[in-house]
Image (cartoon, coloured by chain):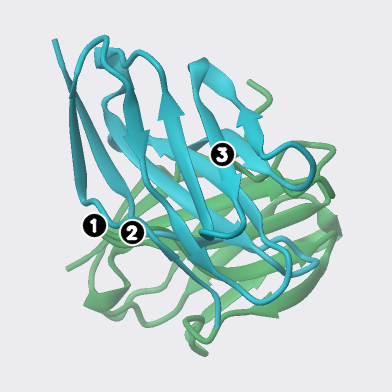
Chain colours: A green, B cyan
Amino acid sequence: DTGVSQNPRHKITKRGQNVTFRCDPISEHNRLYWYRQTLGQGPEFLTYFQNEAQLEKSRLLSDRFSAERPKGSFSTLEIQRTEQGDSAMYLCASSMTDRTQYFGPGTRLLVL
Amino acid sequence: AQSVAQPEDQVNVAEGNPLTVKCTYSVSGNPYLFWYVQYPNRGLQFLLKYITGDNLVKGSYGFEAEFNKSQTSFHLKKPSALVSDSALYFCAVSTDSWGKLQFGAGTQVVVTP
């Protein structure tokens, strides 16, 4: 499978714990995006990488959130001190410069 | 500020009938418009996009969409719906050079046999 992959697919955690998600983009794609989707809503942009550089962060990305893309390949999204409001589907997408974003299956987070 | 509106929460259509899912947008500058489909507990699957050129865009699985600049619309259409088209459909717009997408709230399509 040469699509975007995300791990884990599901994560249940207790409030206050830290969680980390991983995204492996399509190999030749230099652009990588993270989105968050809550029930009944469309995905909301969180952050964008071009190669290893994080070029934009949404105001939704509080200081408890951090994302990295070392060496311009896979990316990680970490949430520290999780809150119940962080419960959502976290989607990763990658693209080349043609703007077509291909999405992974997402990581569903439930904070108890 | 840019925005995307999908005025219908749900569209119901009988199998074999035409399907239309509406999308309107408000942006400054030239929009890049996209349609994605999402099946339960899955990521988003790309259907089609409008960047420039011909206003009628053809995409995957028999879907097409028409870009209408004067009405700021980008409605998704399929001439003959299938039960397997039942899913959640999202319209999205991008205007910046980095390509980040702003999505509508989604329209649930239900195709009955």
Looking at the image, do the residues carrying marks 1 and 2 touch, with CB atoms under 8 Å apart? yes
Kindly report which numbered mark, 3 or 1, lies closer to the viewer in this rendering.
3
Do dots 3 and 1 share one subunit?
Answer: no
Q: Residue at x 45, y 37 (%)?
A: B76
| Chain letter of disc 3 in the image | B
Residue at the spot 64% in from the left edge and 40% down from the top edge: B49
Disc 3 is placed on an element classified as strand
- Residue type at mark 1 is Gly
Mark 2: secondary structure: loop
Q: Pinpoint residue A104: horizontal percent, then vertical percent.
A: 53, 40
Residue under numbered circle 3: B66
Point out residue A34 in the picture as x, y percentages from the top left corner.
57, 61
Q: Quick check: B99 above or below B2?
A: above
Marker disc for residue B105: 2
Q: Amino acid at mark 2?
A: Ala
Q: Say what secondary structure mark 1 lies in.
A: loop
> Splitting the image into 4 quarters, where does residue B80 fall?
top left
Looking at the picture, how far across and down is residue B11, in whole percent? 21, 38
In front of the other: B106 or B44 = B106
Position of B106 with respect to A60 (left or right) is left
Q: Specify the amino acid type for callout 3.
A: Glu
For label 3, count other residues whose C-alpha is less than 10 Å away and answer few (under 14), some (14-19) or many (20+): some
Q: CA distance from mark 2 to mark 3?
A: 20 Å
What whole-number distance in Å separates the C-alpha atoms at marks 3 and 1? 26 Å
